[in-house]
Amino acid sequence: MGKLVIIPTPIGNLDDITFRAVKMLNECQLVYAEDTRVTKKLLNHLNIQNHVVPFHAHNEHRVLEKCIESIKSNELTGLVSDAGTPGISDPGYLLIRACLKEEIEVECLPGPTAIVPALVASGFPSERFHFEGFLPHKKGRETRIKNISELDCTIIYYESPHRILKTLKQLLKILEFDRKACVAREISKMYETYHHGTLSSLIEYFTENKPKGEIVLIIAGKN
Ligand code: SAM
Protein backbone atom coordinates (compact mmCIF):
# COMPACT_ATOMS: atom_id res chain seq x y z
CA MET A 1 0.00 0.00 0.00
CA GLY A 2 1.44 3.41 -1.02
CA LYS A 3 1.83 6.51 1.07
CA LEU A 4 0.91 10.15 0.39
CA VAL A 5 3.46 12.71 1.51
CA ILE A 6 2.39 16.37 1.78
CA ILE A 7 5.40 18.47 0.82
CA PRO A 8 5.45 22.17 1.79
CA THR A 9 7.32 24.46 -0.64
CA PRO A 10 8.69 28.01 -0.17
CA ILE A 11 6.28 30.97 0.05
CA GLY A 12 8.91 33.30 -1.42
CA ASN A 13 12.52 32.65 -0.54
CA LEU A 14 13.58 29.42 -2.25
CA ASP A 15 16.15 28.77 0.49
CA ASP A 16 13.22 27.96 2.79
CA ILE A 17 12.80 24.51 1.25
CA THR A 18 13.74 21.87 3.81
CA PHE A 19 16.27 19.06 3.28
CA ARG A 20 13.47 16.55 3.82
CA ALA A 21 11.27 18.22 1.21
CA VAL A 22 14.09 18.02 -1.36
CA LYS A 23 14.75 14.39 -0.44
CA MET A 24 11.07 13.54 -0.78
CA LEU A 25 10.66 15.39 -4.09
CA ASN A 26 13.50 13.22 -5.37
CA GLU A 27 12.33 9.96 -3.87
CA CYS A 28 8.62 9.90 -4.62
CA GLN A 29 7.54 8.20 -7.83
CA LEU A 30 4.99 10.87 -8.67
CA VAL A 31 4.26 14.45 -7.59
CA TYR A 32 0.70 15.80 -7.64
CA ALA A 33 0.83 19.57 -8.12
CA GLU A 34 -1.63 22.47 -8.03
CA ASP A 35 0.00 24.01 -11.12
CA THR A 36 2.53 21.78 -12.86
CA ARG A 37 4.34 24.77 -14.41
CA VAL A 38 5.04 26.31 -10.99
CA THR A 39 6.23 22.98 -9.57
CA LYS A 40 8.39 22.16 -12.59
CA LYS A 41 10.13 25.53 -12.14
CA LEU A 42 10.90 24.66 -8.52
CA LEU A 43 12.11 21.17 -9.45
CA ASN A 44 14.35 22.65 -12.16
CA HIS A 45 15.81 25.04 -9.61
CA LEU A 46 16.52 22.05 -7.34
CA ASN A 47 17.86 19.95 -10.22
CA ILE A 48 15.19 17.35 -9.65
CA GLN A 49 13.58 15.43 -12.45
CA ASN A 50 10.33 13.81 -11.46
CA HIS A 51 6.93 13.02 -12.84
CA VAL A 52 4.60 15.98 -12.13
CA VAL A 53 0.84 15.52 -12.55
CA PRO A 54 -1.89 18.16 -11.99
CA PHE A 55 -4.19 17.88 -9.00
CA HIS A 56 -7.03 20.41 -8.87
CA ALA A 57 -9.10 21.67 -5.97
CA HIS A 58 -12.42 20.61 -7.43
CA ASN A 59 -11.47 17.20 -8.64
CA GLU A 60 -14.55 15.14 -9.32
CA HIS A 61 -15.07 11.87 -7.53
CA ARG A 62 -13.94 9.99 -10.63
CA VAL A 63 -10.63 11.88 -10.76
CA LEU A 64 -10.10 11.36 -7.04
CA GLU A 65 -10.60 7.61 -7.50
CA LYS A 66 -7.93 7.55 -10.20
CA CYS A 67 -5.52 9.41 -7.90
CA ILE A 68 -6.18 6.89 -5.12
CA GLU A 69 -5.46 3.98 -7.45
CA SER A 70 -2.21 5.56 -8.53
CA ILE A 71 -1.17 6.35 -4.92
CA LYS A 72 -1.85 2.71 -4.00
CA SER A 73 0.25 1.43 -6.87
CA ASN A 74 3.27 3.61 -6.03
CA GLU A 75 5.39 3.42 -2.93
CA LEU A 76 5.54 7.19 -2.35
CA THR A 77 3.41 9.93 -3.88
CA GLY A 78 4.09 13.61 -3.15
CA LEU A 79 1.54 16.42 -3.04
CA VAL A 80 2.61 20.05 -3.46
CA SER A 81 0.79 23.33 -3.98
CA ASP A 82 2.13 26.47 -5.65
CA ALA A 83 3.55 27.76 -2.37
CA GLY A 84 3.43 26.83 1.30
CA THR A 85 1.69 23.85 2.81
CA PRO A 86 -0.89 22.04 0.68
CA GLY A 87 -4.25 21.89 2.45
CA ILE A 88 -3.83 25.35 4.01
CA SER A 89 -6.08 27.50 1.78
CA ASP A 90 -4.80 25.31 -1.03
CA PRO A 91 -5.90 22.10 -2.75
CA GLY A 92 -5.16 18.94 -0.83
CA TYR A 93 -7.91 18.37 1.70
CA LEU A 94 -10.10 16.23 -0.58
CA LEU A 95 -7.22 13.98 -1.56
CA ILE A 96 -6.00 13.64 2.03
CA ARG A 97 -9.50 12.75 3.22
CA ALA A 98 -9.94 10.23 0.41
CA CYS A 99 -6.59 8.60 1.25
CA LEU A 100 -7.45 8.29 4.94
CA LYS A 101 -10.79 6.76 4.03
CA GLU A 102 -8.91 4.13 2.02
CA GLU A 103 -6.52 3.61 4.96
CA ILE A 104 -3.61 4.98 2.95
CA GLU A 105 -0.92 6.47 5.17
CA VAL A 106 -0.65 10.27 4.96
CA GLU A 107 2.39 12.17 6.20
CA CYS A 108 2.71 15.96 6.21
CA LEU A 109 6.27 17.29 6.32
CA PRO A 110 6.72 20.40 8.48
CA GLY A 111 7.64 23.40 6.38
CA PRO A 112 6.78 26.83 5.00
CA THR A 113 3.35 28.34 5.49
CA ALA A 114 2.43 32.04 5.64
CA ILE A 115 0.33 31.87 8.83
CA VAL A 116 3.12 31.09 11.26
CA PRO A 117 5.69 33.83 10.49
CA ALA A 118 2.88 36.40 10.11
CA LEU A 119 1.36 35.54 13.49
CA VAL A 120 4.67 35.36 15.33
CA ALA A 121 6.15 38.58 13.88
CA SER A 122 2.89 40.49 14.41
CA GLY A 123 3.58 40.45 18.14
CA PHE A 124 -0.04 39.52 18.93
CA PRO A 125 -0.71 36.79 21.49
CA SER A 126 -0.02 33.48 19.79
CA GLU A 127 -0.87 30.92 22.46
CA ARG A 128 -4.39 30.83 21.00
CA PHE A 129 -5.37 31.99 17.52
CA HIS A 130 -8.13 31.60 14.97
CA PHE A 131 -7.34 31.15 11.28
CA GLU A 132 -10.11 32.38 8.98
CA GLY A 133 -8.33 31.86 5.65
CA PHE A 134 -9.83 33.95 2.82
CA LEU A 135 -13.10 35.82 3.25
CA PRO A 136 -15.56 35.11 0.42
CA HIS A 137 -15.26 37.67 -2.37
CA LYS A 138 -18.91 38.71 -2.37
CA LYS A 139 -21.73 36.99 -0.49
CA GLY A 140 -21.27 35.93 3.10
CA ARG A 141 -18.48 38.32 4.08
CA GLU A 142 -20.53 40.17 6.69
CA THR A 143 -21.75 36.96 8.35
CA ARG A 144 -18.24 35.55 8.49
CA ILE A 145 -16.97 38.74 10.16
CA LYS A 146 -19.87 38.79 12.62
CA ASN A 147 -19.07 35.17 13.50
CA ILE A 148 -15.58 36.07 14.71
CA SER A 149 -16.54 39.33 16.42
CA GLU A 150 -16.74 37.81 19.92
CA LEU A 151 -13.52 35.78 19.73
CA ASP A 152 -11.00 36.82 22.35
CA CYS A 153 -7.97 35.35 20.56
CA THR A 154 -5.84 36.62 17.66
CA ILE A 155 -7.54 36.28 14.27
CA ILE A 156 -5.72 35.66 10.98
CA TYR A 157 -6.91 36.23 7.42
CA TYR A 158 -5.30 35.57 4.07
CA GLU A 159 -6.00 38.49 1.76
CA SER A 160 -5.18 39.82 -1.67
CA PRO A 161 -3.86 43.34 -2.31
CA HIS A 162 -7.03 44.09 -4.32
CA ARG A 163 -9.35 43.41 -1.40
CA ILE A 164 -7.35 44.35 1.69
CA LEU A 165 -8.81 47.88 1.92
CA LYS A 166 -12.35 46.59 1.51
CA THR A 167 -11.69 43.99 4.24
CA LEU A 168 -10.13 46.49 6.66
CA LYS A 169 -13.08 48.87 6.16
CA GLN A 170 -15.63 46.13 6.63
CA LEU A 171 -13.90 44.88 9.79
CA LEU A 172 -13.87 48.41 11.21
CA LYS A 173 -17.55 48.79 10.45
CA ILE A 174 -18.71 45.44 11.84
CA LEU A 175 -16.42 44.91 14.84
CA GLU A 176 -17.34 47.05 17.83
CA PHE A 177 -14.12 49.01 18.15
CA ASP A 178 -11.01 50.01 16.25
CA ARG A 179 -8.92 46.89 16.84
CA LYS A 180 -5.15 46.65 16.73
CA ALA A 181 -4.07 44.98 13.50
CA CYS A 182 -1.02 44.06 11.47
CA VAL A 183 -0.60 43.65 7.73
CA ALA A 184 2.22 41.22 6.89
CA ARG A 185 3.32 41.63 3.27
CA GLU A 186 5.62 39.57 1.05
CA ILE A 187 6.93 37.32 3.83
CA SER A 188 10.43 35.98 3.08
CA LYS A 189 10.66 38.10 -0.09
CA MET A 190 12.67 41.20 -0.96
CA TYR A 191 9.94 43.68 0.03
CA GLU A 192 8.79 41.93 3.20
CA THR A 193 7.03 44.50 5.42
CA TYR A 194 5.00 44.43 8.61
CA HIS A 195 2.60 47.36 9.05
CA HIS A 196 1.45 47.59 12.67
CA GLY A 197 -1.42 49.83 13.70
CA THR A 198 -5.16 49.88 14.15
CA LEU A 199 -7.79 49.09 11.54
CA SER A 200 -8.31 52.82 10.96
CA SER A 201 -4.60 53.73 10.76
CA LEU A 202 -4.03 50.85 8.31
CA ILE A 203 -6.98 52.04 6.21
CA GLU A 204 -5.42 55.49 6.15
CA TYR A 205 -2.00 54.09 5.19
CA PHE A 206 -3.24 51.80 2.42
CA THR A 207 -5.51 54.51 1.01
CA GLU A 208 -2.39 56.60 0.44
CA ASN A 209 -0.08 53.72 -0.45
CA LYS A 210 -1.46 51.21 -2.92
CA PRO A 211 -1.33 47.73 -1.34
CA LYS A 212 0.92 45.33 -3.23
CA GLY A 213 2.06 41.74 -2.93
CA GLU A 214 0.81 38.81 -0.89
CA ILE A 215 -0.82 39.64 2.41
CA VAL A 216 -1.65 38.11 5.76
CA LEU A 217 -3.87 40.24 7.99
CA ILE A 218 -3.71 39.71 11.73
CA ILE A 219 -6.19 41.36 14.07
CA ALA A 220 -6.46 41.47 17.81
CA GLY A 221 -9.22 39.49 19.45
CA LYS A 222 -11.93 41.12 21.55
CA ASN A 223 -10.44 42.56 24.76
N1 SAM B 1 -0.74 27.11 1.30
C1 SAM B 1 -0.26 28.44 1.57
C2 SAM B 1 0.29 28.49 2.99
O1 SAM B 1 0.61 27.44 3.53
O2 SAM B 1 0.43 29.58 3.55
C3 SAM B 1 -1.34 29.48 1.33
C4 SAM B 1 -1.85 29.50 -0.08
S1 SAM B 1 -3.10 30.68 -0.37
C5 SAM B 1 -3.67 30.23 -1.96
C6 SAM B 1 -2.18 32.11 -0.80
C7 SAM B 1 -2.30 33.21 0.27
O3 SAM B 1 -1.38 32.96 1.33
C8 SAM B 1 -1.93 34.59 -0.25
O4 SAM B 1 -3.03 35.21 -0.88
C9 SAM B 1 -1.55 35.30 1.03
O5 SAM B 1 -2.70 35.70 1.74
C10 SAM B 1 -0.84 34.17 1.79
N2 SAM B 1 0.60 34.18 1.45
C11 SAM B 1 1.26 33.25 0.72
N3 SAM B 1 2.57 33.59 0.62
C12 SAM B 1 2.71 34.76 1.27
C13 SAM B 1 3.81 35.62 1.52
N4 SAM B 1 5.03 35.34 1.05
N5 SAM B 1 3.60 36.73 2.25
C14 SAM B 1 2.38 37.03 2.74
N6 SAM B 1 1.31 36.26 2.54
C15 SAM B 1 1.46 35.14 1.82
Image: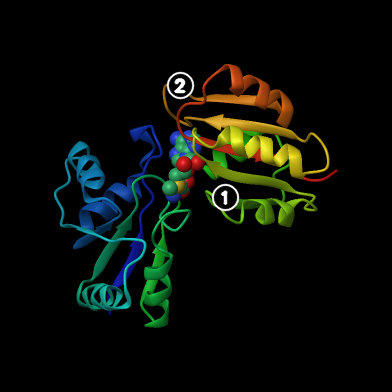
Q: Quadrant of the C terminus?
A: top right
Q: Quadrant of the N terminus?
A: bottom left
Q: Which residue is mark 2?
A: 191
Residue type beneath disc 2: Tyr
In this rendering, the answer to whether 95 lies above or below 116 is below
Q: Which residue is mark 1?
A: 135
**Residue at image point 69% right, 44% down:** 126
Element marked by disc 2: loop
* Left or right, residue 220 beside residue 195: right
Residue 194 x/y as whole percent: 59, 26
Label 2: few (<14), some (14–19) or many (≥20) C-alpha neighbours in 10 Å: few
Cβ(mark 2) to ligand 1 < 8 Å? no
* Left or right, residue 2 beside residue 128: left
Element marked by disc 1: loop
Residue type beneath disc 1: Leu
Residue 213 x/y as whole percent: 45, 29
Q: Earlier in the sequence, mark 2 or mark 1?
A: 1
Which residue is outermost to the right? 223
| Residue nearest the observer in this picture, 26 or 32 | 32
